[in-house]
Image (tube, coloured by chain):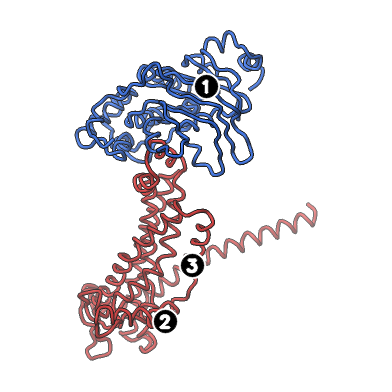
Amino acid sequence: MSLRTRLTRIWEFLIEKAILLAGLACVLFVVLIFVFLLREGLRTFSHISLGDFLLGRKWYPISSPPRFGILSMICGSGMVTLGAALLGVPLGLASAIYISEVAPPRLKEVLKTGIELLAAIPSVVIGFVGITVVVPFLRVAFDLPTGQTALAGAILLSLMAMPTTVSIAEDAISSVPRRYREAALALGATHWEYIYRVALKAAAPGIVAAVMLGIGRVIGETMAVMMVTGNAALIPHSLLQPVRTMTATIAAEMGETVKGSDHYAALFAIGIVLFAITFLINFVADSFLHRSRVTLR
Amino acid sequence: MSDPAVSTIPPGDLPIPSDQPAVEVDQLNFFYGDFQALKDISLSVEPRRITALIGPSGCGKSTLLRSLNRMNDLIPGVRVEGTVKVLGSDIYAPEADLVALRTKVGMVFQRPNPFPLSVYENVAFAARVHKTARGAAMDELVERCLASVFLWDDLKRNLRKSALDLSLEQQQRLCIARLLAVVPDLLLMDEPCSTLDPAATQGLEDLMGELAKQYTIVIVTHNMQQAARVSQDCGFMLLGELVEFDKTENIFENPQDPRTDDYIRGRYG
């Protein structure tokens, strides 16, 4: 074997292993983060039961004795997320339909780029717009003592979920095979009848996945929400009340806590709850995406 | 079409007067951008017969077929000159109603294209869109249409099954059943057997024979034997021209044009 081929072989071997390591590193980081989260957070449950933690109504982390109940934050996150879904899903779905089925090709490109650009705006900037525009508007429009409400968070988050929802739903609708459209039109259906009787049904798994991934994005979002929702750790009764989300709690309190304290561990425990929720949502979305690939083969 | 009573009339009972051609094409020129796909085509299709269009790939036979229900409208940049009359009305007239046209002229595609819905919903599709039947009338319509294509006995216990799980032949039959639910007069078939095996092809050809008792059928095929087996009238196309159009036996046994003769004898195509 010549020196040259031997060198080539060694080089190939090194490249291959380097790529393998890079791939493994991603998995390793996820595992490390997860282990770290568990190690720091699970301690909480040695002095408070999981039930008391999840369903406790009081969050007084630095009084004595401290109270670590996160129900108000779960409700806060839930309400903001639900509101964002109610606002964002119809809008996102409508724009996905418009982009994939109705828009002329050039407008389609412009709209797709525009919506994807929305994902590039830092969330603190969206939060800034929320504070200066949305919050005062809500205060005046609904005659509230403060505009910093769950609704303000929901409005911003529906915007932030839009890029994910629209681009995945648009992909799903666009990948409905052309032959279905021909078949529907040849049967005397109008374009709209084709869209809602065939295209939306054929793309349904992909659309569900789009919505789930949008929601997953919304639950994990921190900055914009923290800026506009008022952050009162109370169980909200309407969208027009201030709420505090799980993410905002972690972000706001982590800097003020003593490392290794019970409060510190409790914040990590909130992180575990968040992780579990987003993991579940992504898992469900992924299985729907997989199903859509099967039906649209 | 809004009268629910329409659905109780069996398909094909809205007869075309036998003295009137089902389709009259007069000096049709068809362009994809700058490319002229059809050149000066004139022909007339008689009702309740099977008319076959044959010719080598790219001769324009599918384009001609698809211009009879204006499916070519979906392609950007097409241009049409000349007139096409279906059941007496000019379908390229500015006031022509595309939805009404497509309820009179149904189309079966080369590749079976059932919707990714259940068997039942596939057949019910047209009646739902045109609001011609629901409830018990819908069940009856679905049964009758499936029976017309001889699928009812096989599928009556599986009406909720996804149409995508059927065999290709069953899918193509289902597509025809779905079409019959529209109560069309004219059926256009664009190489309906090209994805099927010989046994399935035989089955579908028998079905065409049955359907031709009630419907007018125009079929495009590049299988000459199929044209000879199923059709009564036959047109031979080459490079966008209709070279010869006559009774099928004349085309195959006594072609007038040397180009037809060459094609029939397998000298090209």
- Give the distance between the C-alpha atoms of the residues marked 2 and 1, in whole angstroms: 70 Å
> What residue lies at 22% left-to-right and 31% top-to-bottom?
B5
Q: Are marks 2 and 1 in contact (CB under 8 Å)?
A: no
Could you say which is closer to the camera, residue A283 or residue B115? B115
Residue A270 screen position, x and y as percent: 32, 76
Residue A186 visible? The answer is yes
Amino acid type at circle 3 is Leu
Q: Colour of chain B?
A: blue
Q: Could you classify mark 2 by the number of other residues whose Cα lies within 10 Å: few (under 14), some (14-19), or many (20 or more)?
A: some
Q: Are marks 2 and 1 on the same chain?
A: no
Q: Quadrant of residue A131?
A: bottom left
Is residue A155 found left or right of B39 in the rendered image? left
Query: Circle 3 — which element?
Result: helix
Q: Badge 2 sits on which subunit?
A: A
Q: Quadrant of residue B209?
A: top left
Residue that extends furthest to the top in the rendered view of this protein: B253
Q: Is residue A188 above or below residue B265?
A: below
- Give the distance between the C-alpha atoms of the residues marked 3 and 2, in whole angstroms: 36 Å
Q: Are marks 3 and 2 in contact (CB under 8 Å)?
A: no
Query: Circle 2 — which element?
Result: helix
Q: Which residue is mark 3?
A: A28
- Give the distance between the C-alpha atoms of the residues marked 3 and 1, in whole angstroms: 72 Å
Residue that extends furthest to the bottom in the rendered view of this protein: A64
Q: Colour of chain A?
A: red
Q: Quadrant of residue A31?
A: bottom left
Q: Could you classify mark 3 by the number of other residues whose Cα lies within 10 Å: few (under 14), some (14-19), or many (20 or more)?
A: few
Can you tell which mark lies on residue B56?
none
Badge nearest the viewer, 2 or 1: 1
Residue B76 screen position, x and y as percent: 54, 44
Q: Badge 1 sits on which subunit?
A: B
Q: Which residue is mark 2?
A: A128
Query: Circle 1 — which element?
Result: strand
